[in-house]
Amino acid sequence: MKKRIQRIILAMLVVSLGVGCQEKTDYQNVITEGDYLIAAQLKLTDVIIHDIFSPPVASRIYAYPAIAAYEVAALADPGYRSLMGQLNGFEKVNFESQEEIYYPLAALAAYYKVGTAMIFSEQLVRDHKENAYKEIREKGVPKKVFESSVAFGEQVADHVIAYSKKDNYHESRSFEKYTVKSDAYTWQPTPPAYMEGIEPHWNKIRPFVMETADQFKSDPPTAFSTDPTSQFYKEAEEVFNVIKNLTKEQKDIAFFWDCNPYKVNVKGHVMFAEKKITPGGHWMGIASIASKAAKQDWKGTAETLAYTSIALFDAFIACWDEKYRSILIRPETYINKYIDEDWLPLLQTPPFPEYTSGHSVASNAAAEVLTKLFGESFYIYDSTEVAYGLPIREFNSFREAADEAAISRLYGGIHYMPAIVNGSTKGKGLASYMNEKIETKSQKLAKLEE
């Protein structure tokens, strides 16, 4: 009898230990891949569209939350290098906790907190966060671990938010608006809304990697002229003729890469906005698609989102620096005045100067850093625009996608070729510099992946 009781007690102890281990280890597999981070980014994109942020400002909104999530990944895994001490002005601090931390949840908490601090419609992000948190709790993350992990992630977020407040963005909100000039070569507001120049002081924002906004300064645009034999006239005439002879494929390409958050529609006396994704948002979507296709874990996803968003952020600073230096007239204005007063571009002209092409700079910068992360031959099933009523397009590499994004601006009738060619060169140069200057993987992890 005594031995039987001992056996029962021993069996109960074994079961108890087993249950204890199950409770300890099961929740570790609640978040393994990057799905939660990608979902958070998609919600941020929705809010960026809802709040109608400009392409440069959108690039800022994407970057800081992604950096915060990545910093948690770097704390979780010594195979990743912190960006503190690598990005301009990003000071090193130590993060410690006496509690047990579930790092994938902490990264998500960091992303949500910084993302909420970047936008207007905060409740939309908070609601998305609470739904994600509810799902994660129901999957078995212990209450104490959940709370300590969220607190830890928000601690990292606070440091990133403090860092963001020193990039001159908030000060730039009170800078003077752009004053339209009367010189014949200069940019003029275009129909139908005749909006004022967007973000004329964006070159005053602190870059992450570049030393100065004009570090990758482009050659000046072609000398302005109205002489029909001049090079500038020929470049305008090229845009004019391309639009007259567009193929269906060229139109599809132009619409796919439009990404103009300021598109205004006019019906009779009614004017209303059509909300669209930004160029940076499109490339962050591609980054997410690539991460998922490569089956990256949550740390690899955090790296991809951070690395891509950093490149996009600096790309818009470099591009806008040139836009408001050259303040070049758009094809729509020039062609209507000197070639054909009834001519219209396929796409609506965005509200800022022509040179260089923002799509060309940003797309090539993003493509180069993504190529570093995933390799030169990486098939892309780009469904980014499906949510906005456009079909899927497929590419054999990031560079192929960037080339199409760049030339789409000619097909849309909103850029001359030099803005596309020189913008692409600027983006590639910036990305090459970033790839040399910034490291996200330790040498040990890099060798293992090779």
Image: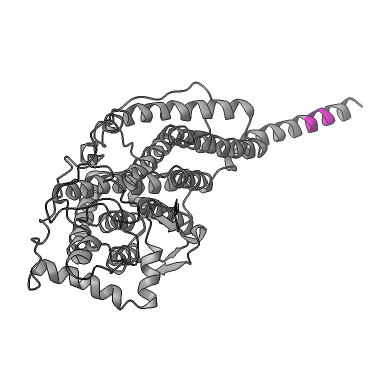
Foreground of the two, 200 or 48:
200
Colour basis: one colour
Residue 11 placement: quadrant: top right
Q: Which residues are magenta?
A: 7-12
Residue 319: image x %, image y %?
Answer: 22, 50
Say which quadrant the N terminus sits in.
top right
| In the image: residue 332, left or right of residue 25 | left
Q: Find the residue positioned furthest to the front.
A: 269
Say which quadrant the C terminus sits in.
bottom left
| In the image: residue 202, left or right of residue 193 | left
Residue 9 placement: quadrant: top right
Which residue corresponds to the image point at 21% horizontal and 37% vertical from the top-left? Answer: 204
Overall secondary structure of the magenta section:
helix
Foreground of the two, 122 or 128:
122
Vertical comparison of 299 with 247: above or below: above
Residue 190: image x %, image y %?
Answer: 28, 55
Tell me if I can see residue 100 in this picture. Answer: no
Number of marks in the image? Answer: 0
Foreground of the two, 269 or 6:
269
Residue 418: image x %, image y %?
Answer: 17, 63
Which residue corresponds to the image point at 41% horizontal and 29% vertical from the top-left? Answer: 156
Residue 438 placement: quadrant: top left
